[in-house]
Amino acid sequence: MSPPDSDASARFDLLERKVVDSLFELNPSLAVGLGVHEYDGRLPPIERDATDAWLRRSDQLLAELRHGDPDRLGAGRQIDRRLLELALEGCQFDLRESAEYDRNPMGYFGALSLTAYTVRPYAPLAARGEAMLRVLQAVPAWLRTAERRLRPELPLPFVQIALSMGQGLPQHFADCEQRLGPELEELAGRFRKAREPAADAVRAFHRALEERFLPRASPEFALGEAHYRRLLWVREGISLSPEELRARGEADLRRNQERLEAIVRSAPPARTVTAYMERIGDDHGSAEELLPETRRCVAETERWIRESGLISLPSSVLCRVEETPAFARALSTASMNPPGPFEAQGSDGVYYVTTVDPAWTAQQQEQWLRTLCRPILRNVTVHEVYPGHYLQFLHLRQSSASLARRCCLSASFTEGWAHYCEQLAIEEGFGAPGTPAEAVQLQDALLRDCRLIVSVGLHCQGMSLAQGAEFFRREAHLEPLNAERETMRGTFNPEYYCYTLGKLEILRLRGQRADSGPGSLRRFHDRLLSFGCPPVGLLEGLLASEPSAP
C-alpha cells in the first residue's frame, strides 16, 4: 500500500472535526459527558425544523466522507472514516427510522439530568451552577415542544417507564440547588426562580403522559427485522441477521447453563440452581453496610489488577462510591459515571449504587439486599470499576486514539468489555472456579444471554412480553418481578444485546490475536483499549492495521 497522502490526510482531519461538531450539536449531553464543556447548559434541538436541517447537513457530511479515494488515507484513518459514517448513520437511524423523538417520551426526561454538572468539580461551582440554570430556564418551552412532537399513539411500555422516570426529576432539581450553598446566594436565588417553573413543566408533561397518552398507548413497539438489521450495522458495523445473532446467544446460554449446573451438582448437598443461588443471597450485610462494603470491593479489585498485571493501570486513580440519585433509581442497580476523555480536571469516577429505600417494606428491603449480596456486589464491581468500565475509560483518557475514536463510543465495546472482564476475573483467579464467585458470574452471563435472545424475539420474532418474562424466569432463574423489568427494558432498549455480542467478539479476537508468552494477555488488553471504544465490527481491522507497541 502506498503511503498516506498528506493533503488527503489534512482534508480528512478537517472533515472529522466537522462531523464531530455536528454530532455534538445534535447531542450536547454527549459532548458534556466527554468533557467538552463548551456545550454545557444546552438541551438537544428537538423542533422538527431543527432536526430536519440536521439531517440534511448529515447527508452532506456523509457524501463528503464517501467522496474521493480512501486509499489516499492510512489504514487507521480509513477505519476512522467508516466510524464517522456509522456515527452519522446511527443518528439518522434514531431520527428517521426508530423515530425516537416522535415515539419515545423517555428520552425527554433523560435529557434533563443535571448529574454531569455535579458529579465532579471540572470547573468552579458557580460556572457549573450557571450551566444548570440555563438548562432549567429552557425546560418549560422545551417540554412543550416535546409534547407537541410526540405522536398521539405511543408504545405502551415507553409511556409506563417514562412515568416512573419523571417522578424523581423535581427532587433532583431541588437537590442540585442545595449543592450551591450559602456562598452562592445570588445564584441560588436565580436557580430557585427557574427551578419552580421547570419542576412544574415536568409535572405538566408527566400529567400529559398519564392523562392523554397513556389511555391511547399501543402495545406495539417492535422495530421489525429490517430496522433491527440496520441497527446492528449503524451501531456496531456488523452485518448479521437476527437469526444469526440469536444463534450466537443461544450457544453461549447453553455453555453457561451447563457450567452453572455442574457447579451446583458438585456442591453438597445437591440442590437446584435456584436453591443454590438463594443460599448465595443469604451472604449480605445490612442496609447501612452496603456502601462501605462497596468501597471495600473497589479497593479489593484495584489491588488485584495492580498485582495481576493483566491490564495496565494508571498510577493515580480515584473512584468514589455514592448513592444513586433519586431520579435514576427506577432504572439502575449500579452504574459508573467515568471521566470523559477530554475532561481536564482529574480522572475521578463515581460508582453509583442503589441503596435500600426506607419506604420499602421489610420484605422488599431484604430482597434488594439479596440482589446485592457480597458475591454479586463483587462481580458488579468488576464490571463497573476494575477492570471494567472505569479502567476502560482511564485508558481512553490517556489514549492517543483519533478524535473520532474518542468521541464515537460503541455500546457493544463498552458493555462487552465490562462483561468480558467478569469472565476474565474467574479465569485469572479472582474468585476460585466452582465457588459462589463463579456462580454469580455465570448467572449474570445467563442474564445477558437472555437479553440478547429476548431482544431478537421481541423485535423480530413476535415474542410477547409474557413470553419474554417467562424466558428470563426459566433460563436465567430470575424472580418474576425482575424478569418483567428485564423484558420491559428490551422494548425500548433492543441494544441490550450489546453485553453478550461484545463479550463474544472480544473472546474471538483474543483467541486469534493473543500470543502465549509471558504478559500476552496484558499486551492484548492494552492494545485493545488503546483503540478507544469503536464499534466491535471495526476491531479486527484495527488489530490488523495498527502495529502493536514494542
Image: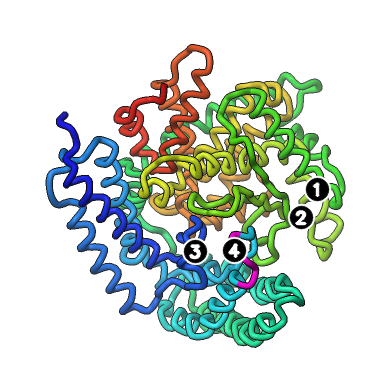
Per the rendered image, the range of residues in magenta is: 122-126
Q: Secondary structure at mark 3?
A: helix
Q: Nearer the viewer, mark 2 or mark 4?
A: 4
Residue position for label 2: 355
Pick the residue in front: 385 or 46.
385
**Which x, y percent locates residue 255?**
54, 26
Callouts 3 and 4 close, C-beta under 8 Å: yes
Q: Nearer the viewer, mark 4 or mark 1?
A: 4
Residue 84 lies, with reference to residue 257, above or below; the image says below
Residue 304 lies, with reference to residue 218, above or below; the image says above
Callouts 2 and 4 close, C-beta under 8 Å: no
Q: Residue at x 78, y 39 (%)?
A: 296
Q: Residue at x 57, y 29 (%)?
A: 256
Image quarter of residue 506: top left
Residue position for label 1: 290
Pick the residue in front: 91 or 265.
91
- What is the CA distance from the residue labelled 3 to the residue labelled 4? 9 Å
